Amino acid sequence: MSVKYIFITGGVVSSLGKGLTSASIGMLLEHCGHKIAMLKLDPYLNVDPGTMNPFQHGEVYVTDDGAETDLDLGHYYRYTNSPLSRASNTTSGQLYDTVIKKERKGDYLGKTVQVIPHITDEIKQRILACANQDKDIRVVLVEIGGTVGDIESLPFLEAIRQFRYERKKDCINIHLTYVPYLKAAGEVKTKPAQHSAQVLRGIGIFPDIMLCRCENPLSSEIKEKISLFCNVPEESVFDERDVLQTIYEVPLDLHNQGLDQMICKMLDLPAKKPDLTDWKKMVHTVTHPKGKVVVGIVGKYIDHQDAYKSVFEALHHGAAACGVKLELRKFESDKLKDFEECDGFVVPGGFGERGWEGMIRCAKYCRENKIPYFGICLGMQVMIVEFARNVLGLQDADSTEMNINTPHPVISLLSQQKNVQNLGGTMRLGAYPCELVDNSLAKNAYGQSLISERHRHRYEFNNEYKKAMEAAGMLFSGTLQRGNLCEISEIKDHPWMLGVQFHPEFKSKPLHAHPLFKDFIASLVCEEAPI
Ligand code: GLN
């Protein structure tokens, strides 16, 4: 049986939630019994988002094989079981890099190298490579970043047009568009949606399904209008409402409108009714909490809502697993006040000096007042530096990232990182195995001795300080397997103060909360609150 392809484009404006929608469709098809793979095509020229400022791009999602990828892959991970690797995200930068390298090698045999066909052929190759990751894959979902009409995304759309032309029966296009309600006019407007479908048609792509982001469900008159003017049958016009209680309701809402059955019909796939019991149960727990915890997040990029996307989601998963509602308080790390309002704190990953001393103040406050603290990557380094300064009395202890001349470099570069010149793709990246010690918070939470977690950092704990720290009450509960890098630190005389050098948030799912996030939230749930 041939592999089927679903292309998902976005129209009118960005931030319509294309990644979440693609992930939701993937989840529904998986629940219909089809093995899927997901691919994100990004039109920008960076080779990957690794070198981009989080304020520009939001979180960088890291895969097991160490690829630094778009944050939409985080949605794919949370909603589906799609394989995720370097093959799941391609940027224009990578495509041009490949084509130019081939040109220099003489692979094009004297031809003029052009966007069409050379870049478009490369795009088609990436789509096929995604399908070939596993022989059982039946459906590939390809999300195209950006908005139709952007100059940058034209080669991608042209490649899709050709791909579809070559496999007429095996492809559909889903166009996510915007149908706003204009308050002043008291009306829902379809014109932007019409225009975005028109732009697509101008490129030679006819949408098969129109998915309309809107405030409230669309009336049948509006759907009729969209159908007529966008050249799509009325039963193929679906709405995606804004006001749901949790993002995990999106696939249920789409399923209730029959989207999964329609896709299966169009692609001639067996349309088994999906069993969504587990997902519905999870949504019910999230929407019917039995208590509340307040978690403070102290970070540098707190104003950007996507910069710590996976951390926020993982905390929500932990809260759902404990049956409580999570209230997040966000603290800019250089403007800290009102610590008292929070039950516990998270210091997530980050780079550079700004806000560093504020994070250390947070760790000090948590250690001294026995308030739960969860340090992730930079947050573990913060915890170690604070301990060195205030417990060991090494006043100027620091990370060499923040102070290259510190007399006590408790966090420093490994020798292999010292001569790194290029910033892109040169950190410790991807999955590493870690061994846990008995009688530790970590081992207790994971319930096993060997774990695998994903890394993205340059600096490490300096083992020269290990003995002194242990003697003063720090437990190094996780170590790189067959190595000596400290991956987890805990404060022994404390209810829950733990730092991890890796990024556990990348491996948390709503149906399987990450053990550390679950255990952290559980430590905040006061005794009276029923779990
Ligand atoms: N800046 C730190 C390092 O490179 C932490 C990185 C992170 O938090 N991802 O080691």
Image: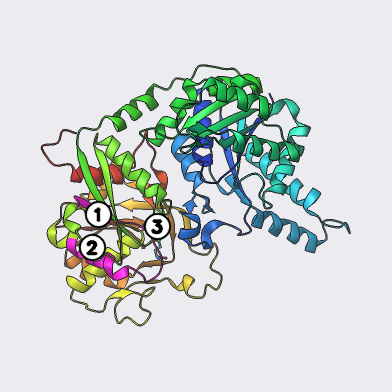
Instruction: For the residues labelled 1 and 2, say whether their Cβ atoms are less than 8 Å apart.
Output: yes
Instruction: For the residues labelled 3 and 2, say whether their Cβ atoms are less than 8 Å apart.
Output: no
Q: Nearer the viewer, mark 1 or mark 3?
A: 1
Q: Amino acid at mark 3?
A: Arg
Residue 355, position as x, y percentages in the image: 33, 68
**What residue does disc 3 label?**
482
Residue 42, position as x, y percentages in the image: 61, 50
What residue is at 51 percent from the left and 23 percent from the top?
219
> What segment carries the magenta color?
342-365
Q: Nearer the viewer, mark 3 or mark 2?
A: 2
Picture quadrant where residue 331 is located: bottom left
Quick one: label 1 or label 2, which is nearer the N terminus?
1
In this picture the colour scheme is rainbow
What residue is at 69 percent from the left and 52 percent from the top?
151
Q: Secondary structure at mark 3?
A: loop
Q: Which mark is residue 345?
A: 1
Residue 472, position as x, y percentages in the image: 16, 67
Judging depth in this view, the residue of 292 and 318 nearest the camera is 292
**What residue does disc 2 label?**
362
Mark 1: few/some/many CA within 10 Å (<14, 14-19, 20+): many
Q: Dividing the image into four equal quarters, which quarter contains ligand 1?
A: bottom left
From mark 3 to mark 2, how far is it between C-alphas?
Answer: 33 Å
Placement of 218 over or under 42, stated as above or below: above
What residue is at 75 percent from the left and 30 percent from the top?
167
Quick one: label 3 or label 2, which is nearer the N terminus?
2
Picture quadrant where residue 467 is located: bottom left
